Image (cartoon, grey):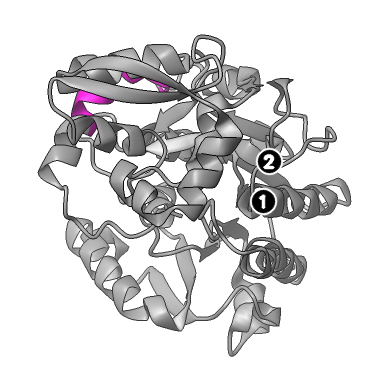
């Protein structure tokens, strides 16, 4: 049977990198990318770039106007697309820690529900692939396994809670018969080899703060930095890991946490950052709630420090992500998460040479 892929989230970072890999597995495979009107020009340019890089993709990728927040994904002919589809990849989401509740509900929850309804119309469907996030854990204290989902957790923001509720919808569809694989990345940073990224958040906030100082750098720390861990993964590990896992029959109906199995503590991460940027860090203990409130409500402070209030809780995150299933099912592929210290110099080099780049949003 000829494979036809339907993808949301193109031309986002993940979709634009995954799609060519998926199509190269089978020379006869084709794809329909559902693209919002506002991203149509960007999607066209990205598609042209992919075709230049790999002429074998010519004629195999179609861009269709649509909107995941609408029934039928906003397409003119959803039934026609559904009749062709063998695989549905749902990558699109609002990735913004400060997103409003209404937007998070409409895009992350309602959009996911609409994709599931569309997938149910695909009579040839072989699998639904869904990209979630490790942070469906919320602020769960302790280990969070790949089989965990609802453990009574509280959430830091509407982004987390909406992605949790979206994954609940996906899990319900899986449990009633839809063949599904779920991927949960941790905090994604740049490529481990080139440092290239489309967004500066997570650890980049702290890196930018260090780079703005000279010699001795004041480092605000929340809670006990020797007891909490900051889990980051390079984008190439996420892309290659999802590509590999999605190609395996045994991964159907499984969930994978694409996180660092051995994340550094916040203290260790700060030490490595100071080493790479050539600063002597001096820790300044700060109360978490007061710090977050001040960054949220005192505009000059956030502009000066460069760290948004929404990012503060992640520097005192109480959850440890178990990656056993991902490690086992990637064994033998050569795909492993490299240690943060090994690729940090590449992240810093890219950041220093692209300070003013308009990097957009990675989804």
Q: Position of residue 77 (x, y in %)?
A: 61, 87
The residue range painted magenta reads 335-347
Q: Nearer the viewer, residue 25 or 229?
A: 229
Q: Position of residue 167 (x, y in %)?
A: 73, 49
Helix, strand or loop under label 1: helix
Q: Position of residue 295 (x, y in %)?
A: 46, 46
The residue under the point 68% across, 41% down is 136
Spatial CA distance of label 1 from label 2 is 6 Å
Q: Is residue 198 above or below residue 243?
A: below
Is residue 271 found left or right of 126 in the rendered image? left
The residue under the point 19% across, 40% down is 351
Q: Which residue is mark 1?
A: 163
Q: Nearer the viewer, residue 253 or 160?
A: 160
Q: Nearer the viewer, residue 37 or 150?
A: 150
Disc 1 and disc 2 in contact, CB within 8 angstroms: yes
Q: Position of residue 199 (x, y in %)?
A: 33, 49
Q: Pick out the residue farthest to the right.
A: 176
* Residue 343 counted in the magenta span: yes
Q: Which residue is mark 2?
A: 136
Helix, strand or loop under label 2: helix
Label 1: few (<14), some (14–19) or many (≥20) C-alpha neighbours in 10 Å: many
The residue under the point 14% across, 39% down is 352
């Amino acid at each position: 049977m000829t494979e036809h892929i339907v993808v949301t989230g193109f031309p986002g970072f993940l979709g634009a990198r995954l799609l060519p890999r998926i199509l190269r597995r089978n020379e006869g495979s084709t794809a329909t990318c559902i693209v919002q009107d506002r991203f149509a020009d960007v999607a066209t340019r990205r598609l042209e770039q992919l075709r230049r890089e790999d002429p074998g993709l010519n004629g195999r990728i179609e861009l269709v106007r649509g909107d995941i927040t609408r029934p039928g994904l906003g397409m003119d002919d959803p039934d026609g697309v559904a009749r062709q589809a063998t695989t549905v990849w749902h990558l699109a989401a609002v990735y913004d820690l400060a997103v409003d509740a209404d937007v998070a509900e409409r895009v992350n929850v309602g959009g996911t529900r609409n994709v599931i309804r569309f997938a149910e119309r695909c009579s040839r469907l072989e699998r639904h692939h869904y990209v979630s996030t490790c942070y469906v854990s919320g602020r769960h204290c302790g280990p969070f396994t790949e089989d965990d989902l609802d453990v009574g957790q509280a959430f830091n923001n509407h982004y987390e809670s909406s992605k949790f509720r979206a994954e609940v919808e996906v899990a319900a569809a899986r449990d009633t018969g839809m063949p599904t694989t779920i991927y949960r990345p941790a905090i994604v940073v740049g490529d481990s080899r080139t440092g290239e990224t489309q967004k500066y958040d997570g650890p980049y906030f702290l890196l930018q703060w260090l780079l703005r100082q000279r010699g001795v750098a004041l480092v605000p720390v929340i809670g006990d930095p020797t007891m909490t861990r900051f889990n980051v993964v390079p984008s190439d590990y996420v892309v290659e890991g999802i590509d590999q896992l999605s190609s395996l029959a045994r991964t159907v109906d499984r969930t994978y946490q694409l996180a660092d199995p051995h994340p550094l503590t916040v203290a260790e991460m700060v030490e490595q950052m100071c080493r790479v940027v050539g600063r002597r860090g001096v820790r300044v203990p700060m109360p978490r709630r007061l710090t977050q409130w001040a960054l949220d409500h005192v505009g000059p402070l956030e502009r000066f420090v460069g760290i948004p209030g929404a990012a503060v809780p992640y520097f005192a995150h109480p959850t440890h992500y178990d990656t056993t299933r991902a490690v086992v099912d990637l064994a033998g592929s050569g795909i492993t998460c490299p240690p943060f210290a090994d690729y940090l110099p590449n992240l810093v080099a890219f950041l220093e040479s692209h300070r003013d780049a308009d990097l957009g949003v990675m989804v």
